[in-house]
Amino acid sequence: MKITKIDAFQVAWAPGDKPSQRSAFVRVHTDDGLIGNGEASPMQGGLASLSMIKHDIAPLLIGQDPLDHAVLLDQAIHTLVKLGPEGALTGALAALDIALWDLKGKYTKLPIYKLFGGAWKTAMPFYASIGGNGDRGVDEVLRVVEQRLKDQPAAIKIRFDNNRTTLDTDIPHDIAKARAVRNLVGNSFPLAFDANNCYTTGGAIRVGRALEDLGFWWFEEPVQHYHVKAMGEVARALDITVSAGEQTYTLPALNDLISAGVRMVQPDIVKMGGITGLLRCAALAYAHGVELVPHQTQPMIGHTANLHILAAQLHGTKPAEWNDPSTRTHAIFENPPKPIAGLFHLSEEPGLGLTINEAELTKRRVDI
Ligand code: CA
């Protein structure tokens, strides 16, 4: 089998949307007619990653055997390392890796999790990841949480999404929101708090102590992601589990986070390494006795690829992330992932198990 064409493009979900609101998809075609589908991180519409795929990486892959994906993509990152390597380049390679695993599954007629060695489970609970709570008042936060409880999540995470150029802006109000949500859902419902990097080390420890009293399950990204030692200091100072890693793009960088003291890591399949990369992260986390709970906010290809990893994970300790209702809708998929009674079910179809409606995709694709 040989790669004959690599197609990188945006998908528009609504008429008149901005380029930054679109998804970034890649399709890898082969000489036996199979097509693998992948997705890159859609920051700014994924345009930087799509451009690298089109101009820099596709020429390295055309004519190659897609089953050599790990060698090919390691060659690509080392050839193009000065383009990044973090962010746009790792997002580009992640999209291609997911597409090549989808192809491998279609070629072998097996779901991807079978190729890992099997699934511990194919029905998976999720947590509702609720963004934008920094700008909301306490009552508004409660209304949004009530709305998301209708989806039957196994847990809820409140994200603050504050401006990262200011720190510790209103700690008492942040704690008041956490307390109000705790009162709303009752003492036994699992909750998480995502600071989105907006505290100082001291501020984070103060908030973390309050979250411990409120019985929160984990405290995410308390300080700036690039302050790896400070992230570790907060993690070591607190009893609550501190998590980080969604802005970590390489395996050595993830190792640095673990060495600093972080005991729950959250790399993202569409930002770094794709399926191959996340499997390596899982091995690293397992070797250190650290929890791997991937970050994932794309509702279709990224989410499904992530579920394959979670299905095959030995110690899956937390539910899968499921983001706010997305403008990146289900429109181009015949069998989009949707939770049923609080669970996502993986299909037994080959590859990712997603079927694309080609006519709908043609209507919505935007060439770069
Ligand atoms: Ca987060």
Image (cartoon, rainbow, N blue to C red):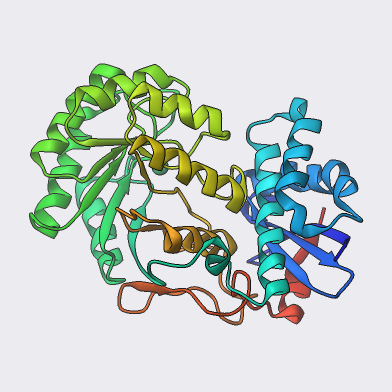
Number of marks in picture: 0
Q: Is residue 177 visible?
A: yes
> To which quarter of the image does residue 179 belong?
top left
Against 320, residue 333 (above or below) is below
Q: Nearer the viewer, residue 307 or 361?
A: 307
Against 40, residue 284 (above or below) is above
Q: Is residue 42 visible?
A: no
Looking at this rendering, what residue extends furthest in the front direction?
117
**Residue 22 appears at what percent x and percent y?**
65, 57
Residue at image location 36% in from the left, 79% down from the top: 340
Residue at image location 42% in from the left, 72% down from the top: 122
Left/right placement of residue 339 relative to residue 302 reads left
User: From the image, which quarter does the N terminus lie in?
Assistant: bottom right
**Residue 132 appears at what percent x and percent y?**
38, 46
Left/right placement of residue 310 relative to residue 211 reads right
Residue at image location 47% in from the left, 74% down from the top: 346
Residue at image location 80% in from the left, 47% down from the top: 53
**Residue 150 appears at what percent x and percent y?**
27, 72
Q: Nearer the viewer, residue 149 or 107?
A: 107
Quadrant position of ligand 1: top left
**Residue 77 appears at what percent x and percent y?**
74, 36
Left/right placement of residue 315 relative to residue 32 reads left
Against 311, residue 244 (above or below) is above
Against 327, residue 224 (above or below) is above
